[in-house]
Image: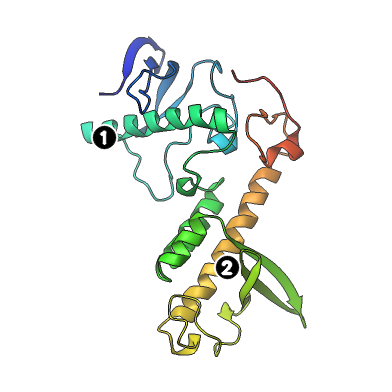
C-alpha cells in the first residue's frame, strides 16, 4: 500500500496526497506531492512548501525542490516494473517520515545511511565505504559514527594526509604515492598483532580509504561553497547546517 491518493493530473505530472503512517500506526502528516516523469525515472517534490523547505541539502531537498531519494551513482532508479515502482514509493514514504523527525530534532535521522552532497562526494563516499568494509567491522562502525577525520600536512615538499580517530592520529598517507608511511607500524585494520607490511593488502586499502575520505569531505565543502553567489537562502530548520554561514538564514520558511 502506497498510502497515497491520486488527486489530479497536472500536465506531465500527477498530484498525490501522501500520508505515511507513523510507527504507532497512526496517520502522519499529509503531503501534496507532485510526481513527474523524467526519462526512465520520476522526480517528486512538495506541490507547495507547506510542510517542507523549498531547498535544504541537509534534508535532501534539491535546489529545484525535488527530493533526493536515490544514490544515483550506485542505486538503480529506473522505474520500469511494478516492483521498481513499489520500491520508489517505499523510499518516498521513508523520506517523508524522516522529514517529520528532522523538523523536530533539527538533524537528519538515519544520518549514517545518508549519501554525501554532490555527485563527486557521493562517489568518494562509496570508495571510502568499500575500503572500510575490507578493514573490518570497527572501521565500518567508526565511519558511520563520523569518528574519522583527516588533516593534510606538507612536510619537506611532500603532501601527507593524516587519519585521525576521535582526534587521535592513526597513520599518515603520502598523497602523491598513495602509500601509507611506516609500513612497519601495527596494522590498523583488525590485525593489530601484525605490521602493515605483513597484513595482506591492508597497506593499499588503508591508503585508498584515507584519500577517499579526505576527498569526500573536500568535495562536500566544494558543493556547499558552490552556492555562495546564489540567491538561495538557508531555511534555518537544521542545526549546524553548513549553508547557514554561507548563505544566511531564511527563517520560518517551513511549517
Instruction: Where is residue 44? Give x, y as percent.
Output: 44, 26
Q: Tell me which residue sits at (45%, 86%) in the image.
A: 193
Question: In the image shown, does 19 or 105 lie closer to the viewer?
Answer: 105
For numbered disc 1, what is the local secondary structure? loop
Would you identify the image quadrant in which residue 34 lies? Answer: top left
Mark 2, residues whose alpha carbon is within 10 Å: few (<14), some, or many (≥20)? many
Q: Quadrant of the N terminus?
A: top left
**Residue designated by label 2:** 211
Q: Which mark is residue 80?
A: 1
Question: In the image shown, does 232 or 248 lie closer to the viewer?
Answer: 248
| Mark found first going from the N terminus, 2 or 1 | 1
Would you identify the image quadrant in which residue 132 lies? Answer: bottom left
Question: In the image shown, does 150 or 6 lie closer to the viewer?
Answer: 150
In the image: residue 26, left or right of residue 236 = left
Question: In the image shown, does 215 or 184 lie closer to the viewer?
Answer: 184
Q: CA distance from mark 2 to mark 1?
A: 37 Å
> Does the rendering let one see residue 19?
yes
Is 218 located above or below residue 3 in the figure? below
> Does the rendering let one see residue 39?
no
In the image: residue 79, left or right of residue 151 = left
Q: Quadrant of the C terminus?
A: top right
Q: Tell me which residue sits at (65%, 70%) in the image.
A: 168
Is 49 located above or below residue 189 in the figure? above
The reply to whether the C-beta atoms of the residues labelled 2 and 1 are less than 8 Å apart is: no
Instruction: Where is residue 85? Give x, y as percent.
Output: 28, 31
Q: Tell me which residue sits at (49%, 55%) in the image.
A: 144
Q: Which mark is residue 132?
A: none
Instruction: Where is residue 141? Give x, y as percent.
Output: 46, 60
Q: Tell me which residue sits at (56%, 28%) in the image.
A: 104
Colour scheme of the picture: rainbow
The mark closer to the camera, 2 or 1, is 2
Instruction: Where is residue 145? Give x, y as percent.
Output: 52, 55
Amino acid at each position: 500500500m502506497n498510502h497515497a491518493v491520486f488527486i489530479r493530473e497536472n500536465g506531465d505530472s500527477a498530484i498525490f496526497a501522501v500520508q505515511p503512517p507513523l510507527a504507532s500506526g497512526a496517520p502522519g502528516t499529509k503531503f501534496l506531492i507532485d510526481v513527474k516523469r523524467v526519462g526512465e525515472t520520476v522526480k517528486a517534490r512538495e506541490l507547495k512548501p507547506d510542510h517542507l523547505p523549498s531547498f535544504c541539502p541537509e534534508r535532501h531537498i534539491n535546489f529545484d525542490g525535488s527530493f533526493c531519494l536515490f544514490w544515483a551513482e550506485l542505486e538503480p532508479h529506473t522505474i520500469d516494473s511494478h516492483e521498481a515502482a513499489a520500491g520508489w514509493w517505499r523510499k518516498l514514504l521513508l523520506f517523508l517520515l524522516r522529514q517529520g523527525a528532522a523538523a523536530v530534532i533539527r538533524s537528519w535521522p538515519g544520518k549514517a545511511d545518508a549519501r554525501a552532497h554532490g555527485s563527486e562526494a557521493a562517489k568518494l563516499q562509496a570508495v571510502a565505504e568499500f575500503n572500510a568494509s575490507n578493514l573490518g567491522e570497527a572501521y565500518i562502525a567508526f565511519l558511520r559514527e563520523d569518528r574519522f577525520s583527516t588533516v593534510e600536512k606538507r612536510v619537506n615538499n611532500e603532501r601527507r594526509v593524516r587519519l585521525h580517530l576521535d582526534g587521535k592520529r592513526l597513520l599518515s598517507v603520502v598523497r602523491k604515492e598513495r602509500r601509507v608511511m611506516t609500513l612497519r607500524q601495527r596494522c590498523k585494520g583488525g590485525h593489530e598483532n601484525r605490521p602493515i607490511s605483513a597484513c595482506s593488502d591492508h597497506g593499499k586499502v588503508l591508503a585508498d580509504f584515507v584519500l577517499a575520505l579526505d576527498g569526500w569531505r573536500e568535495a562536500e565543502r566544494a558543493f556547499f561553497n558552490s552556492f555562495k553567489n546564489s540567491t538561495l537562502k538557508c531555511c534555518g530548520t537544521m542545526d549546524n547546517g553548513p549553508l547557514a554561514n554561507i548563505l544566511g538564514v531564511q527563517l520560518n520558511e517551513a511549517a
